[in-house]
Amino acid sequence: MKKLLFLMSLIWVALSSCEKEDPVVTSIALDKSELELKVGETYDFKVSHNPPDAKTPAYEWSVSRYYPLWGGGQGVDVAIIDQSGHFEAINVGETYVTVITTDIVDPITSKRFSQECKVTVKPIDAEGLKLDKTDLTLDPGKNETLTCTISPENATNKSLYWKTSNSNVVTVSPKGDNSNQCELTATGAGEAVITVVLSNNSQLNATCKVKVNAAKLEGLSLSEKEKTVIQGESFKLTPVFTPEYATNKNVKWYSSDENIATVDNNGNVKTVHFGECVIKVKSEDGGFEAECKVVVKPIPLDGIKFEENYYSVEIGGKKQLKLQYFPDNAGNKRVKWSSSNTIVATVDENGMVKGNTRGNTTITAISEDGSHKAECHIYVVEINEMMLVYFPSASVSIINGYYTGNISCAIRNNSSQAVKLTKFYVVDTGNYNIVAETTDESLLGKELKPGETCALRGRFNSIYEPAFRWEFEYNGRTFSTYNRYGDSVSLKSSESIEPKGKSSNTIQLYKDKDL
């Protein structure tokens, strides 16, 4: 037994004398894999390792940046963490906390041990808004500052929006972006409500009721004291009130000469004619007056021309010349008239030409300022040079002294003006009685242009000594001629012998372009 005990003692001593090795870390773990905090909150992360009796490794802590649009921009620092694992949330967003060993590696992967935790940082919602003033009374033109307090003080969103219910009474001007202060300006008598609203929560707001006292008008003037414009132009006059914030700004407008310019209730001035006038404004409050002298210049004349390049006038006759003006609404249309040969024709100050003797002359019109000129040619002619009726052919049979046949005739306008055929009929030259006449409206009253020829055909039956009566309208006067078949005659005055009686017979007269 003693030998056995001795042997066992030797074995224990041997075993106890052997060197013992430390355990090796095989993994690490964080106390949180996901975490939610609000801005400003903190958290102390804890890390453990296995086996627990292994030597505690050295650690390195870090947080990632937040990219709302992945890969865009610089990213946002959502939180900070120190090397003890103390985490502090500083901005809204998401981040990842990473812990990694610095002195040991995984024997299997040869990489350092690491763990991470997803942290979501949420905003601190505002719970209330409060204004430092809820009721104000101001005089027009005065300013006041409103201050808004947000609770809690550490609320994340502090962006405010200010508005007024009536900008004609009070205007608002926030002092900087997201400012909790706003400057009020009283602009007119009345009441308005100022409202401040949290930008992301319209249900969270505060109000201040503002009353602005009335202000008397002390003076009135116009934006312009003198205005020069072209006829037809329009412009606006603006009343200037002293003080600007006067309560009653009602005014009435007047024009000293509405033939020159008119003005409406809003100060809009419309020019009518060239000349001068005065636009006046009078205030309802205090009866203050102001005025503006308006000088309206005529629309400039760009050019003139005669309606025709030449005209014909009979000896002793008259012709009113007409000008075209460019533009047609030019203000000054006064011209000076002259004739290059007053022996042939004269012209008066109104452009009326009188033919004196056979020949031609040039009529000149010059604008009053001498910048524009127009010319036309006047031909003074005998009356019988203006119209010609002739018979190129006729087919007539005579039975017992009575004529029956077909007529072919032509009418030519040799004047420079249009001539109308107003009547055509057959007369008996024995007694000058009307035998037959045409009533064809397609022929009567038609104008023959200068140089134009109208060919006509007709038929007559059993007429003793037939002749033909033509009547024309020229230059406001009536002329007539008689002729027999085969004869050519010129236009004569209507003072010639008038035919007697009236026939019920109708001449079949029609145009023939091939005549």
Image (cartoon, rainbow, N blue to C red):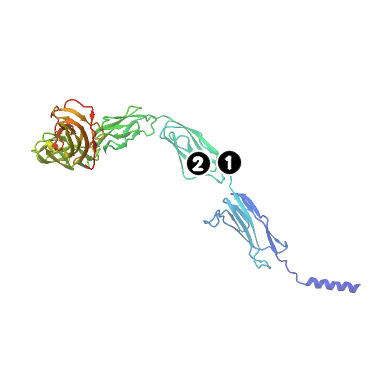
Where does the image place residue 184, in percent across and percent down from the top left?
45, 37
Mark 1 secondary-structure assignment:
loop
Where does the image place residue 33, in percent across and percent down from the top left?
66, 55
Where does the image place residue 451, in percent across and percent down from the top left?
18, 41
Any part of residue 49 in sight: yes
Where does the image place residue 147, in percent across and percent down from the top left?
50, 39
Is 207 on the left-hand or right-hand side of 97? left
* Position of the N terminus by quadrant: bottom right
Q: Nearer the viewer, residue 367 or 158?
A: 367
Is 46 on the left-hand or right-hand side of 337? right
Determine the CA span between mark 1 and mark 2.
16 Å
According to the picture, the residue beneath numbered tag 1 turns out to be 127
Location of residue 380 (image quadrant): top left
For disc 1, the neighbor class at 10 Å (few under 14, some 14 to 19, many from 20) is: few
According to the picture, the residue beneath numbered tag 2 turns out to be 161
Q: Nearer the viewer, residue 16 or 87?
A: 87
